[in-house]
Amino acid sequence: MPVPSDLSVTRDVSLRRRYRFGPWLALASFLSAVTAVLAIAYWVWQPTTLRIAVGPSGSEDEALVLAIANALDAKAGSLRLAPIATDGTLQSLNLLGAGKTDLAVARGDFDMPTNTNSVAILRRNFVVLWAPTGRKGAARSKVTEIAALAGHRIGVVGLGDANLTLLRVILAESGVNPQKVTVVQFGPDHISEMTQDPTLDAFMMVGSLDAKVLADAIAATTRLRGEPKFLAVDVSEAIAERHPLYESEEIPAGVFAASPQRPDDKVETIGINHLIVAPATLSEDTVATFTRELFAVRQTLVRTLPAAAHIQKPDTDKDAALPAHPGAAAYIDGNERSFMDKYSDYIWGAVLLLSGLGSVAAWLRHYLRREERSINALHRDRLLTAISSVREAASLDDLAAMQSAADEILRETLACHEDGAIEDGDLAAFGLVLAQFHQAIVDRRAVIARTDASDASAKPGSGALQPVPISTVAR
């Protein structure tokens, strides 16, 4: 009797399928995990690049920002600076407001975009007002104080509205009607024309006290029109009280020249911060990192660029006219977040991501082995159906063939279980059917053995005693 088709085994096909998908599935899972880890590492450790708008080209501001950018590159830390050249502060702030730059260099009394915060003070600008006293033998200038500027002409360096507005504030607070003072504005590249204009009775510049252009302008007017008379802003404290963007400051004696001293005594004036500013929406961690890196390289910069010595920390008071960015304030006040505070969300995100990838890999593995599970279920059903065929088997050879086929099915099932194609519950169900099959084999063998014994005893010459004819015995 041939082996029933119920027990025909698809072992070769199933094994080929398993060996085809198994290694590739493991490789795909491994590559997915490696890709996720590398992507997270690249994202976390990739240096952050901040754009910073600064201008005009060739200015001290641009030179300082370029030096800072080079120092950060050399430090090879977690942050880089990418300068964007502009025509000046106004364009820099426009780029900041449009979101086309992350940082900008600007004077503190300019109109800032909404929700702009300070990150660092690059320098303190001072208002310097002076009037020529006239050369020897010539009539001396009548302008000896700000109150005497009414009816006179004053040359102001800077074509924008910032210096003009500041002058008007100083005049008004000093009791001078700004309408009675004629103002002539000059660009930074036309200072020589200003110093040579004999119709001007006074001059005004705003900048750092060690700026070469300021010292040169004072020296030029001294050479052409005599020693300067520096005009004190006696109402500086009142101006600072009413206009928080301005501060009361003093110009030290001899800061512009040592012999003779210019000025010969300290002079009260107005100070304005020149800042690096950023939108409040810029990441606190990023700004804190930039602030920390900036002050870390400041001492190195001072060796080659003395202007870097003026870099200061901004006012972290929440009531400041231009408040410090929360990230900068956190660094300055020592409230920076710890590693876990910063990256706990990322760590949990990575855990969830890897968990998700594991689930996807498990689902993919489960999906690719769906045919193996179907074939295994079919084997179990065929084995169950084959029990009836076992009970009808006519010979031990048929039972041996069925047993051999069942053994192949068992090997295939165990291999599928080891590879994870079927679960423990499926294996237990298969084991129950296999036990019934084996019991049927044992029972059928016993029946066949008894039948063979009976048939053997019924045949002649089988070895049993035969009756002897009486006639034969009588002879």
Image: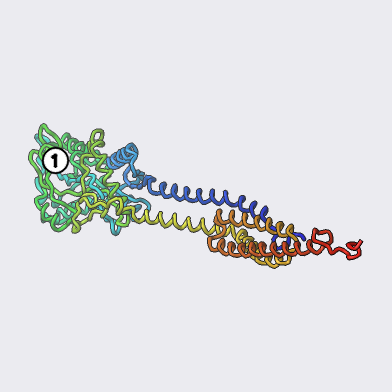
Residue beneath disc 1: 132
Q: What residue is drawn where x is 9% and y is 40%?
A: 140
From this view, report whether residue 375 is shown above or below residue 166: below
In screen coordinates, is 59 left or right of 218? Answer: right
The N terminus, quarter of image: bottom right
- The front one of 41 and 450 is 450
Residue 358 at x, y = what percent? 48, 56
Question: Does residue 189 appear anywhere in the picture?
Answer: no
- The front one of 200 and 412 is 412
From this view, report whether residue 292 is shown above or below residue 319: above
Quarter of the image holding residue 393?
bottom right
Q: What residue is drawn where x is 29% and y is 56%?
A: 280
Residue 292 at x, y = what percent? 26, 45
Residue 189 at x, y = what percent? 28, 41
- The front one of 387 and 443 is 443
Quarter of the image holding residue 4?
bottom right
- The front one of 40 and 15 is 15
Residue at the limit of the structure toward the front, as seen here: 474
In screen coordinates, is 395 left or right of 254? Answer: right
Q: What residue is drawn where x is 11% and y is 56%?
A: 238
As shown in the figure, which amino acid type bears the numbered disc 1? Pro
Residue at the limit of the structure toward the top, as seen here: 259
